[in-house]
Image: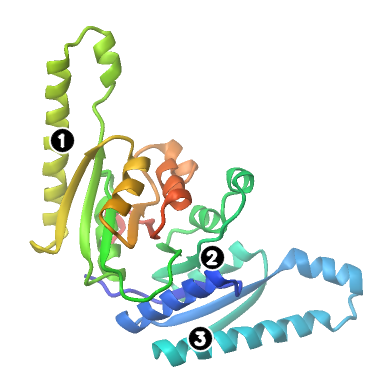
């Protein structure tokens, strides 16, 4: 299993972002990874400021200085509580552009951001900050909702047996090396209702259902074997129904504090739209969410 690479935590100094920075520091301490804490001053906001106050105003320099002071204060707190050195990064411009650029420069193994509450309409039209970041990066992204009181204990991995599924397991083991893993697959009988309308009897539909469950179970066990998971450290969870609903349901029923998803599903549409399952879990789940973005054949 490869070690977790450099961690980049983006912060806007909100409460949610502070939770994210604390989780990032805990992960850095546990894994020995380096930690960079970053804040981006909005480029459009700075342009407005220059227009209002004039190009000769020293307000922009004062804002940069104040931001650096806030970053240093947060870094000092993290160093004191989590015992990790923290590198600072400050930039101005389009926040997502700057975060992606810094991640590229660091060759970051993990991006960590806070889950930010926004209105339904804004989420529908623009997506949350974390969702927009997921569309822009090819690196794993950890979206933090909860205070980092302890290491992750139980991790729910949503598997669709796409080329990204094996990588999900690897990333989960990097972020939560001592957690118990729940390998979930939500299966569905194709066109079950239409089969009934077409005159297929219930017994035959039930046979298809049992076959689908058996196939999903076999594939989960095969994937666990391919990933090198040891008995007792994982369990299979095979459920029928819509994956979006079942993931959130099982996260709560099985008391999981982290959900791991693949950024891409098996269709081009899901790739273009981030993935309806990922969006639903980000919006409706209660735990932290780790989104893996690499295919199994891209693993080093």
Where does the image place residue 119, in percent across and percent down from the top left?
62, 50
Where does the image place residue 190, in percent across and percent down from the top left?
26, 25
Q: Quadrant of residue 234?
A: bottom left
Residue occupying image coordinates x 27% and y 48%: 159
Where does the image place residue 71, in percent across and percent down from the top left?
59, 84
Q: Which residue is mark 2?
A: 100
Colour basis: rainbow
Q: Quadrant of residue 255?
A: bottom left
Where does the image place residue 206, in percent across and percent down from the top left?
15, 23
The numbered disc on residue 87 is 3
Q: Which mark is first along the chain, 1 or 2?
A: 2
* For discs 2 and 1, the disc positioned in front in the rendered view: 1
Give the camera-side residue of 34 and 299: 34
Q: Which mark is first along the chain, 3 or 2?
A: 3
Contact between marks 2 and 3 (CB within 8 A): the answer is no
Q: Which residue is mark 1?
A: 213
Q: Which mark is first along the chain, 1 or 3?
A: 3
Q: Residues within 10 Å of mark 3 (few under 14, many from 20)?
A: some
276 vs 179: above or below? above
Mark pair 3, 1: CA separation = 48 Å
Secondary structure at numbered mark 1:
helix
Give the camera-side residue of 122 and 164: 122
Q: Assign the C terminus to one quadrant of the image.
A: bottom left
Give the camera-side residue of 233 and 58: 233
Contact between marks 2 and 1 (CB within 8 A): the answer is no
Secondary structure at numbered mark 3:
strand
6 vs 285: above or below? below
């Amino acid at each position: 299993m490869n070690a977790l690479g450099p961690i980049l935590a983006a912060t806007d100094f909100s409460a949610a972002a502070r939770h994210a920075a604390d989780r990032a520091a805990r992960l850095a301490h546990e894994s020995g990874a380096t930690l960079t804490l970053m804040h981006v001053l909005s480029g459009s906001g700075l342009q407005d400021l220059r227009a209002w106050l004039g190009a000769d105003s020293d307000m922009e320099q004062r804002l940069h200085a104040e931001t650096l002071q806030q970053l240093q204060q947060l870094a000092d707190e993290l160093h004191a509580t989590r015992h990790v050195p923290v590198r600072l990064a400050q930039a101005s411009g389009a926040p997502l552009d700057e975060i992606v650029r810094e991640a590229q420069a660091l060759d970051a193994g993990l991006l960590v951001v806070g889950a930010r509450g926004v209105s339904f309409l804004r989420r529908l039209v623009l997506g949350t900050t974390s969702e927009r970041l997921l569309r822009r990066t090819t690196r794993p992204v950890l979206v933090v909702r909860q205070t980092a009181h302890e290491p992750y204990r139980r991790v729910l991995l949503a598997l669709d047996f796409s080329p990204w599924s094996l990588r999900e397991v690897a990333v989960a083991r990097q972020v939560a090396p001592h957690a118990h893993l729940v390998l979930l697959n939500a299966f569905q009988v194709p066109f079950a209702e239409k089969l009934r309308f077409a005159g297929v009897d219930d017994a035959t539909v039930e046979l298809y259902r049992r076959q689908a469950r058996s196939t999903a179970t076999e594939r989960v066990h095969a994937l666990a074997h391919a990933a090198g998971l040891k008995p007792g450290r994982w369990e299979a969870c095979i459920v029928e129904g819509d994956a979006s609903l079942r993931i959130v349901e099982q996260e709560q029923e099985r008391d999981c504090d982290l959900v791991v998803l693949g950024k891409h599903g098996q269709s081009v549409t899901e790739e273009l739209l981030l993935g309806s399952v990922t969006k639903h879990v980000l919006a409706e789940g209660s735990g932290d969410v780790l989104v893996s973005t690499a295919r199994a054949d891209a693993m080093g």
